[in-house]
Image (cartoon, rainbow, N blue to C red):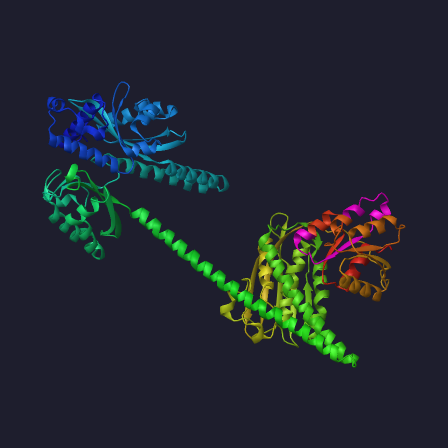
Amino acid sequence: MKIPIEEERLIERVLVVLRLAEENGLEPGAMEELPPEKLREQGINQHTLAQARGFLLFLDEIPGGFLIYRAWGDEQIIYANRGLLHLFGCDTVGELRALTGSSFKGLVYPEDLEAVEASIYRQIRENDDRLDYVEYRIRRKDGMLRRMEDYGHFVRSRSMGDFFYVFLGDATEKHERRERERLSLQSVALEKDREMQKLIQRYDAERALIDQEYLRRLEVIEGLSINYESILYADLDMDQVLPYRLSLRTQPMFESRFSLRVYSAYTAEYVQRWVHPEDRQRVLRMTSIGYIREKLAQNPSYYLNYRVLTEKETQYLQLRIVAVGEGENRCAQVVLGFRSVDEEFRREMEQKQILAQALTNANLAVTAKNTFLSNMSHDMRTPLNAILGFAQLAKRGLGSPQEVLGYLERIEASGRQLFDLISKVLELANMEAEQFCALEVECALRDIAQEVYDSLRLQAQEKNIAFTVQIGPLRHETIFSDPEKLRQLLTYLVNNAITYTLPEGRVTVCIEEQNEMPGPYIPYRIRVQDTGIGIEKDFLERIFEPFSREKSTTLSGVHGVGLGLSIVKNIVDLMGGSIEVQSTPNEGSTFTVELNFRVQQEAPPPPSQAAGTPPVRSRSILVAEDNEINLEIAKELLQMNGFSVDTAQNGSVALEKVRCAAPGQYDAILMDLQMPVMDGWQAAAEIRKLPNPLLAGIPIIAVSANSLREDVRRSMECGMNAHLPKPIDIDEIVRQIDALAPHR
């Protein structure tokens, strides 16, 4: 559609004033300095000049860029507002003209120019002078490329010739978002089947229809601003308002465009008709003539946000009021622009909700931390109190060996309880701090289950609990998995079952191989069932959360900070499995784990050792330990188990003793890690470099309080054969020596 006659005349008068300002070397803002005779020659009076100046001031206030340029020839730039300077990173119009050669052709990125101009003139021909729309890139003054949206209108003026006026907005983020969406859809299309591809094509078709509808709507947009739905000019001295552009809300309130109304009457009607009841008093006050004058006396513009009522929902609008008068009457003439801020406001509300949720989560984290510290304080002090108390009783009862023995057994039990608590806390912290991955090495599920049974059988016997393990039948004895994590998972589940099962109860472990799946993986089910105290339904939802316990240690009589099942859940998730729990209070619980293991054909079993032939135990051990108490304990325990013991106070001494030893003098080395002069890792690495292979190959077992995964990995990299945590478990040390040095 063509521009209305009134608006075309206004633009022509503005262009005449701009041309006169340019011919006289004046900036657009200094047009009042134009010679009166020049203005009279062009038929421009003071009222017209003030109207043009107010119009240009308004253009400087609108968001985004505004540009007027000649339609033919070198496409010379006639006018650019402050918003356009901002888009190009320029401070003055002179900088913009220097950057672009004062031409629209210099404004567009060269690679886009030909397509842009072809699109503009094609749309002019096809759309009968309606609004045209193009996208292109620009290069800012700082060299940065940005993508622009261009809404232009072609005007054929009798007095000024042909020209374009254009509104520009930065669409870089919008373009990048659409590009990310497109790439994301392409990625999905590559992974999904042809049906998904059809859905994507349907989405593209619907998006194209939406874009076409959007362009059709743009064609009917009138006026000079793409960002404002209504633009009004008000003379506060005259209490009059004149519409430049009308929306669906404001159009019924005027007879036609450029028809005058009483400003105060219009404001009262608008507020009563459209504004949300809760915002009406505020909007009336902030749009009153007295308030406008007061605010504009301090700043050239101000805005207010408010809600409007529609048939479907409440929307948010922003009214910006700009002073465009001159001199002392600067605040008497104003422009009012109404634009929708519904999307921005709702985004802000969503952000506030996100922040509120983050605050809630942070408070929950603080509560969880405080609960954990409270539990830790209680559960650490309880065994510590027992250790210190029984130690004092043992001192007083030295005359009764049997009584002292009972105290020592209780000290040992409390020490193991404290050690288990600390180990679990460190293990969970290590899981959260490191990036874990599950290994796939050859192992036997039956052997792992047997090891777990052997390690926990005595604990079940002490409570007279019937503890059984049912395996199979297994079609695949050998699997590929992470044996250490499997052992850990089973140990925690079974230990949890034994701990919460009363004497005379029953704990059953079932390991079953499920039906085969296509491919090399087979599903296995591990079920741990007990007849224990059970779990309340409300707590089942939080049972795998760290530091969570249904009852405190004091109420339940069972020690622990609720970390074992959290570790189990982490292991199951890491191995790509699932875990479920069913429980009835006072009847028992059942934990079911589903895991998929890669399998292979079973190899023939190795020849077993003749029945009744015990392993030949090594007899000579070198212990490297800098702590005198730990060294004394290790020496006594090893000698009680039939070993002869030599000692070294640090890694350097241990290295020298091995270098000077005869082959076969030492059957194994127990190596602490944190030692002065030379630590255990360095000593092990140097021993492996000795020229005599019989000395360089002596089995080395790390025995250290450094028990994190990184410590174990470093021990293996330095050539050690095994890594055991402190405090010393003499039975485990003997088993490791028998396994590593059976020939000795």
Quadrant assignment, res 120:
top left
In the picture as drawn, the residue positioned furthest to the top comes out as 73
Start-end of magenta stretch: 684-711
Query: Could you say which is closer to the camera, residue 52 or residue 663?
Result: 52
Q: Which residue is drawn at 77% across and 49% down?
A: 684
Query: Could you say which is closer to the camera, residue 267 or residue 615?
Result: 267
- Magenta-span inclusion, residue 704: yes
Q: Which residue is drawn at 75% across and 80% down?
A: 397
Q: On the rendered image, what quadrant is the C terminus found in?
A: bottom right
Q: Residue 643 at what x, y percent from top left?
A: 85, 62
Q: Is residue 686 visible from the viewing direction of this image?
A: yes
**In the image: residue 154, left or right of residue 640:** left
- Magenta-span inclusion, residue 267: no
Q: Residue 77 at what x, y percent from top left?
A: 27, 24
Query: Could you say which is closer to the camera, residue 469 or residue 688?
Result: 688
Quadrant assignment, res 75:
top left
